[in-house]
């Protein structure tokens, strides 16, 4: 099994909705941060990848998956695009101000200092926090990094290999880009701030311990 789709969008840009959409159209299982919570070995695998990118064991990390979205993989979309040259890149985006507000209410909410002896916080400190200089609640910094990331994706991925995607775009652009039939019903739209708090926030809190 090899990756057919790589999501380059940062977390809180509709990545969970994209995960479910890809699985619905036959391009799953799809890796997402929630998969890290399911596999106790995953945080250390990602930390090892961050420590030695040229020798990252992507095959082991993504064993059993046909696609991947969200963090941790979004940090390494360029490396993954090179490792899986036939994969298509789907880049999820949303308004920068909305994205920042969403991160502060969910994934970047203040949960106190990281315990770097624990696998999940150690992974975050290597894979995500460095993108923002560890300043996860600095609005200007986060939005600047977010906008720069979106621009770099456009600069580094060939246009024929890249889809800039908003969840509100629906099935049409996604299915056309991936060459699959449009399924019945609307595209998934999940993991709102309220749903995050009820379903995923507890997993994050537990993983931080």
Image (cartoon, grey):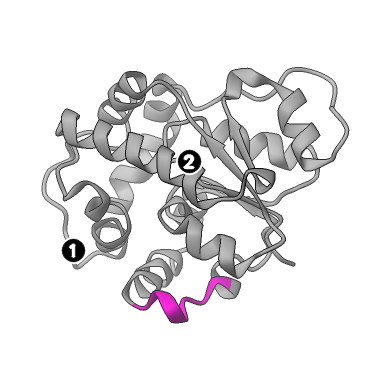
- Residue at disc 1, secondary structure: loop
The secondary structure type at the circle numbered 2 is loop
The residue that label 2 is drawn on is 9
**Dot label at residue 186:** none
Where is residue 199? Give x, y as percent.
45, 32
For the view shown, which residue lies furthest in the bottom direction? 55
The answer to which image quadrant residue 108 occupies is: top left
The numbered disc on residue 116 is 1
Please state, as top left, top right, bottom left or bottom right, where the C terminus lies in the image: bottom left
Tell me which residue sits at (75%, 48%) in the image: 27
28 or 55: nearer the viewer: 55
| Residue 13 position within the rendered picture, expressed as x and y whole percent measured from the top left | 46, 31
- The tally of labels here is 2
Magenta residue check for 4? no
Residue plotted at (34% across, 34% down): 147
Segment tinted magenta in the rendering: 52-58
Examine the rendering and report whether any part of residue 209 can be seen.
no
Q: Pointer 1: residues within 10 angstroms few (<14), some, or many (20+)?
A: some
> Vertically, is 71 above or below 117?
above
- Judge whether residue 206 can be spotted in this image: yes
- Where in the figure is residue 126, as x and y percent of width and height? 27, 62
Seen from the viewer's position, the closer of residues 56 and 78 is 78
Q: Quadrant of residue 80?
A: bottom right
Q: Tell me the residue at 66%/64% (across/down).
A: 85
Position of residue 114 in the picture relative to residue 193 (left or right): left
Q: Is residue 53 magenta?
A: yes
Q: Nearer the viewer, residue 117 or 94?
A: 94
């Amino acid at each position: 099994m090899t990756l057919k789709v790589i999501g380059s969008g940062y977390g809180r840009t509709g990545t969970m909705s994209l995960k479910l959409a890809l699985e619905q159209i036959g391009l799953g299982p799809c890796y997402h941060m929630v998969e890290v919570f399911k596999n106790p070995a995953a945080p250390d695998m990602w930390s090892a990848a961050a420590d030695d990118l040229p020798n990252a064991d992507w095959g082991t990390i993504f064993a059993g998956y046909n696609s991947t979205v969200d963090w941790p993989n979004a940090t390494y979309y360029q490396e993954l695009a090179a490792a899986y040259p036939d994969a298509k890149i789907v880049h999820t985006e949303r308004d920068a101000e909305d994205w920042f507000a969403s991160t502060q209410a969910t994934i970047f909410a203040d949960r106190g200092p990281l315990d770097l002896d624990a696998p999940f916080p150690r992974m975050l400190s290597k894979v995500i926090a460095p993108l923002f200089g560890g300043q996860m609640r600095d609005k200007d910094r986060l939005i600047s990094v977010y906008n720069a990331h979106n621009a770099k994706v456009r600069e580094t991925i060939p246009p024929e290999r890249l889809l800039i995607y908003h969840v509100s775009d629906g099935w049409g652009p996604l299915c056309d880009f991936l060459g699959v039939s449009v399924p019945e019903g609307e595209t998934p739209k999940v993991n709102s701030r309220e749903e995050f708090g009820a379903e995923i926030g507890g997993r994050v809190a537990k993983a931080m311990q």
